[in-house]
Image (cartoon, helix red, strand yellow):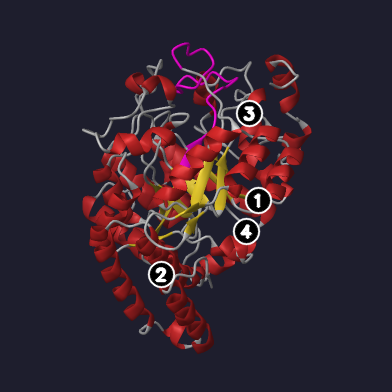
Amino acid sequence: MSQLSVKEWTDQVIKQDQIDKYLIDGEDFIDEEKINKNLKNNREPNRVKVRDILQKSLEIERLSPAETATLLNVQDEDTWQEMYATALEVKKKVYDNRIVFFAPLYLSNLCVNNCAYCGFRKENKDEKRKILSKDEIIKETEVMVREGHKRMIAVWGEHPRSDIDYMVDSMKTIYDVERPAPHGPGRGTIRRININAAPMSISDLRRLWEVGVGTYQVFQETYHKPTYRKMHPPETIKGNYRWRLYALHRAMEAGIDDVATGVLFGLYDWRFEVMSLLYHAIDLERQFGIGPHTISFPRLMHAAGSEVAEKSPYLVNDQELKKIITVLRLAVPYTGLIITARENADVRSEMFDVGVTQTDASTRIGIGGYSQMLQEWSHFQDRSAGQKEDEQQFILGDTRRLDEVIGELAEKDIITSFCTAGYRCGRTGEKIMGLLCNCVEGKFCKLNAILTYREYLDDYAFEETRQKGMKVLEKELNELKEIEFFQERPEMMREFYDYYERISNGERDLFI
């Protein structure tokens, strides 16, 4: 337990000077009047104008606010169909035909905040509070690596017991876990820890960078200031809108050059929120030269002790979610897009076809939930089985095992990637953004996806999935011979084929 009381700790968290330094003439980058004016002035766009904008997206250029507002205002269904197709084309051009997998690990649900929509909020007396010990973290991680995961996103509540010291120790513990694969010769480890954590000071963020943080993710929840004030009581840390708004700026200054943002869609009008995400990307580019590495778009879900999801007039339906993802893919074509197991299997499957690049599987968000998972798989009867409302932040829509989701993607000829090579080769931040914008990074990722997919199929896949996956691998390997980029790099391809052969014979963790 921290020596500081919760109030003492809360009072010292926010550093006003680490907000003010990023302001422009004392103002932040969310100008609600400007956003609404853009949305109003670009109503009823014609198809010629839309097609010009789509061509810009295909050239992998970020769209302007006016162009993005134009797409958000499209009403014609045929034009939307054209936009969906273009979004997928942009995704394949930048990221190729792959989906990157990760799994979340919730380490604590203690929280000093009181967000109206969240099951973790401090006034929810029905929530069973827990923080994982070192031994419990090891057990949770063991289950995750035995499923085949190589990437994790670690999640903590904001509380003195889960402060920066606990975060750093947690990450060290996770990275140290190594366990044999169930089928092949590999040994499972988490190769990259991304984190979803509260906004921090630059000095605390530097400590995360030193211990090997991957992407640092902070969701603004809503950019609409009146709604933000309503959802986040002003006496809490999270009640400070600008402390949260500039969390990614501080991370960039601390050396964490892969940052991620998102919105909890359903709190306010989704068109306004998409525009705000774009302005966030623009301001990061203005001040640091690069935008967000990924954007997420969770929808407001029912949470224990909260009625916000039932009462909100801004809930986003499936078709609107598809439009959100499509416009984001077109507006920031170089940025990864994440859809999570909040959504059910059918929704996720549809969203893979409009530009999503990352997702999770085998997901448990109850504190200590993975340790129960192996016993639970044998008696799951429905999608909510095994979930405990009083122990998690919200209820998941898709609790399928990683193997099942990978098998489904293989049926669609989509390759699964567990690649973490870019981060260990220095292809992060400004470097990776340049490669993405020039449609080069996806080529490296294609090769490393093949290598890590073969690892998974040999070490973790059930036989049915392995057979489906080997057909996908055959298709991917044949494609390499037809792509000019690879034809022009015979030396790199000799190295790749050597690595593929060595992985097929039992070596692991080889990458381009």
User: In the rendered image, which quarter contains the C terminus?
Assistant: bottom right
Which quadrant holds residue 135?
Answer: top right
Cα distance between the residues tagged 1 and 3? 18 Å
Q: Amino acid at mark 3?
A: Ser
Spatial CA distance of label 1 from label 4 is 14 Å
Amino acid found under the numbered disc labelled 1: Gly
Amino acid carrying label 4: it is: Gly
- Circle 2 residue: 450
> Neighbour class for label 2 at 10 Å: few (<14), some, many (≥20)?
many
Q: CA distance from mark 2 to mark 3?
A: 38 Å
Amino acid type, label 2? Ile
Residue 338, x across and y down, in percent? 43, 48
Q: Secondary structure at mark 1?
A: loop
Q: Is residue 480 left or right of residue 128?
A: left
Residue 115 magenta-drawn? yes
Of helix, strand and loop, which one carries label 4?
helix
> Which numbered disc, 4 or 2, marks the residue closer to the eye?
2
Which of the numbered marks, if any, corresponds to residue 162? 3
Task: Please provide percent x and percent y for residue 133.
Answer: 58, 30
Stretch in magenta: 103-127
Q: Residues within 10 Å of mark 4 (few under 14, many from 20)?
A: many
Mark 3, secondary structure of its residue: helix
Question: Which of the numbered marks, if any, corresponds to residue 212?
Answer: 1
Q: Which residue is mark 4?
A: 429
Q: Is residue 380 above or below residue 253?
A: above
Count every numbered label the image shows and give the total.
4
Q: Nearer the viewer, residue 354 or 48?
A: 354
Few, some or many C-alpha atoms within 10 Å of disc 1 (few <14, some 14-19, many ≥20)? some
- Across and down, in percent, residue 21 comes to 76, 40
CA–CA distance between discs 4 and 3? Answer: 28 Å
Q: Is residue 239 magenta?
A: no
